[in-house]
């Protein structure tokens, strides 16, 4: 049997495709819905790599300008945007459970088509899907410690990414790889970027559910707001499968769909299929599969429960022979817990912790030149005893204007993280200038949202908006409107629909429709409609979606064909719910 990770030496080396003159494509590993993955070689650094290519589109249907062509073109735009976002999202995440990203670019292939590519770490090992499928659950089920070790490592990755407002949305066995050392790598952050209810109206299908149905949370099946808790439900489905070898729900001849089962049916207890599963683990699985996302534990809490079982510490752990036999297994997922070279106590921060934006308020009587405290230092600056002192100085107007021009250029170039670093430094330097400092923090609040730092964006936009109103700016002022708008969208992304509705209402009630960007107004209305549905205001949501459909059909016509079709689905569903 040929080793797929060994370079194919047949034929001339020069005949093989190279990207950027250095990444040689040697053979196909697999295909997905929107991309192909190859094994190859980085000839400059002398190492094997994985190469992911966005699949070229097929022949477009219909004539130019037809509804069929419009839907096709929209889907191609979504695929490319999703692929590029996967690259940026994955590259920004630093965790041993996430494959490293090495390079990206666009090349012209021999067929003349230009394709986006991503070069990343090549993983040698086995998918968790293969592990489950190859395990005899009747006579020799997967050990409790092995199941806990895999799920705990995934929980650790989720704790890390949830802390920076990333939701994976497709946790399943096929997206997890066990590699030598027993480490679990989480793949495919390609749909992480499509979370939430406020993607731009003409870039995302409104009613398009993203994920794998067997592992999708009730809110994903319903097309509702997606939060970090959605990943916990999927992880619960995964842990259920690791312990039992079964899926939580199956479609049977009863006529119930998989969607209705995940939304309405109570999941079977783990112990019904495997009685020897310890009660604490069975209880954890049940909590992770709660229908209401607010009742599920956090990723960090899941990790804390699972880690002792993975390391074999509980008094009622499995027989010692299982742990002994696992020692020789290079893919044993308990090894990182028994020899924790990469697991440090307390290394998984809660979503509310970490370096963030905590701008000071200018309360009455507070001196304008008050120095920044460690806890107040802006995003991008270290804190603690070893942090360098930040000297607050009065920025000149020319300096502020130059910084804002550079920030705009960085955002336009899709480099918001660099823009945040620049703004953080400017805010720190300009702490003695309340007026220009407020302007810088307003731009920082907006940029945090564009960089998908939603938790921080919501808080800072609220703070800046309150200060603007305190200084006498009118609720219809562009700064106040912008803060309400971005705070509303950010709260929608973090699963706080009541706050999202409040802020979006403040924006829509005070915005001059003749002066506002039509797409921004549409985005706010669309997100507000979803938030009405999320808060159980079905009749109001139906009216909002109906009005939104009328606006889209009138203003955008056939260019909004795909979204109109999806809005029709939502309107029919809400209409049925209201009787």
Image: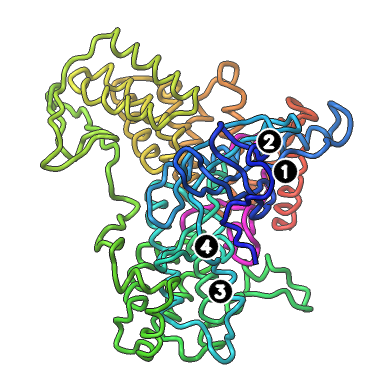
Discs 2, 1 touching: Cβ within 8 Å: yes
Span highlighted in magenta in the image: 199-228
Query: Residue 437 sits in which quadrant?
Result: top left
Which image quarter is the C terminus in? bottom right
Which is more toward the observer, 380 or 325?
325
**Residue 465 in the image: x percent, y percent?**
36, 29
Q: Nearer the viewer, residue 89 or 248?
A: 89
Q: Which residue is mark 2?
A: 548
What distance separates the C-alpha of mark 3 from that of mark 1? 41 Å
Callout 2 environment at 10 Å: few (<14), some (14 to 19), or many (20+)? some
**Residue holding disc 3:** 131
Q: Earlier in the sequence, mark 4 or mark 2?
A: 4
- How far is disc 3 from disc 4 in space, using C-alphas? 10 Å
Q: Is residue 69 above or below residue 334?
A: above
Q: Main secondary structure of the magenta part?
A: loop
- At 15% from the left and 28% from the top, the residue drawn is 390
Question: Upstream in the sequence, badge 3 or badge 4?
Answer: 3
Residue beneath disc 1 = 567
């Amino acid at each position: 049997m040929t080793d797929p990770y060994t370079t194919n030496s047949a034929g001339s080396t020069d005949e093989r495709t190279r990207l950027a003159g250095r990444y040689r494509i040697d053979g196909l590993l697999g295909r997905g819905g929107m991309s192909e993955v190859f094994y190859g070689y980085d000839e400059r650094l002398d190492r094997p790599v994985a190469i992911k290519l966005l699949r070229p589109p097929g022949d477009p249907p219909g004539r130019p300008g037809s509804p069929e062509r419009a839907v096709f073109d929209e889907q191609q735009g979504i695929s490319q945007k999703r692929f590029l976002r996967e690259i940026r999202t994955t590259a920004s995440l630093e965790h041993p459970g996430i494959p490293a990203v090495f390079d990206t670019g666009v090349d012209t292939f021999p067929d003349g088509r230009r394709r986006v590519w991503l070069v990343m770490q090549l993983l040698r090992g086995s998918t968790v899907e293969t592990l489950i499928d190859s395990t005899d659950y009747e006579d020799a089920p997967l050990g409790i410690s092995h199941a806990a070790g895999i799920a705990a490592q995934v929980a650790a990755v989720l704790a890390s990414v949830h802390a920076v407002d990333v939701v994976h949305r497709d946790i399943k066995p096929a997206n997890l790889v066990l590699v030598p050392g027993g480490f679990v790598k989480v793949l495919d952050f390609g749909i992480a970027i499509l979370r939430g209810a406020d993607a731009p109206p003409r870039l995302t299908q409104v009613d398009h559910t993203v994920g794998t149905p067997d592992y999708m949370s009730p809110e994903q099946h319903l097309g509702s707001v997606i939060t970090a808790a959605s990943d916990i439900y999927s992880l619960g489905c995964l842990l259920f499968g690791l312990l039992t070898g079964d899926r939580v729900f199956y479609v049977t001849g009863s006529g119930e769909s998989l969607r209705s089962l995940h939304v309405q049916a109570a999941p079977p207890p783990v112990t019904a299929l495997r009685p020897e599963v310890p009660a604490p683990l069975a209880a954890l699985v049940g909590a992770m599969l709660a229908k209401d996302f607010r009742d599920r534990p956090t990723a960090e809490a899941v990790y804390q429960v699972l880690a002792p079982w993975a390391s074999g510490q509980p008094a009622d752990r499995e027989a010692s022979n299982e742990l002994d036999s696992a020692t020789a297994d290079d893919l044993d997922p308990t090894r990182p817990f028994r020899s924790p070279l990469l697991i440090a106590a307390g290394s998984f921060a809660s979503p509310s912790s970490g370096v963030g934006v905590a701008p000071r308020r200018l309360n009455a009587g507070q001196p304008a030149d008050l120095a920044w405290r460690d806890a107040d230092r802006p995003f991008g600056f270290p804190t603690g005893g070893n942090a360098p002192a930040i000297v607050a100085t009065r920025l000149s107007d020319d300096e502020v204007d130059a910084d804002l021009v550079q920030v705009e250029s960085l955002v336009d170039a899709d480099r918001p993280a660099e823009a945040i670093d620049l703004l953080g430094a400017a805010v720190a330097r300009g702490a003695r200038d309340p007026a220009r400092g407020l302007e810088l923090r307003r731009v920082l609040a907006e940029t945090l949202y564009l960089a998908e730092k939603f938790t921080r964006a919501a808080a800072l936009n609220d703070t800046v908006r309150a200060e603007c109103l305190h200084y006498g700016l009118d609720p219809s002022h562009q700064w106040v409107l912008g803060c309400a708008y971005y705070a509303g969208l950010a709260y929608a992304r973090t699963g706080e629909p009541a706050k999202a509705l409040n802020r979006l209402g403040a924006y829509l009630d005070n915005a001059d429709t003749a002066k506002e960007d039509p797409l921004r107004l549409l985005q706010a209305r669309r997100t507000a409609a979803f938030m009405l549905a999320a808060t159980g205001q079905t009749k109001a949501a139906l009216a909002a979606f109906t009005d939104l459909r009328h606006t889209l059909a009138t203003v955008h016509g056939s260019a909004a064909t795909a979204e109109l079709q999806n809005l029709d689905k939502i309107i029919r569903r809400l209409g049925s719910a209201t009787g």
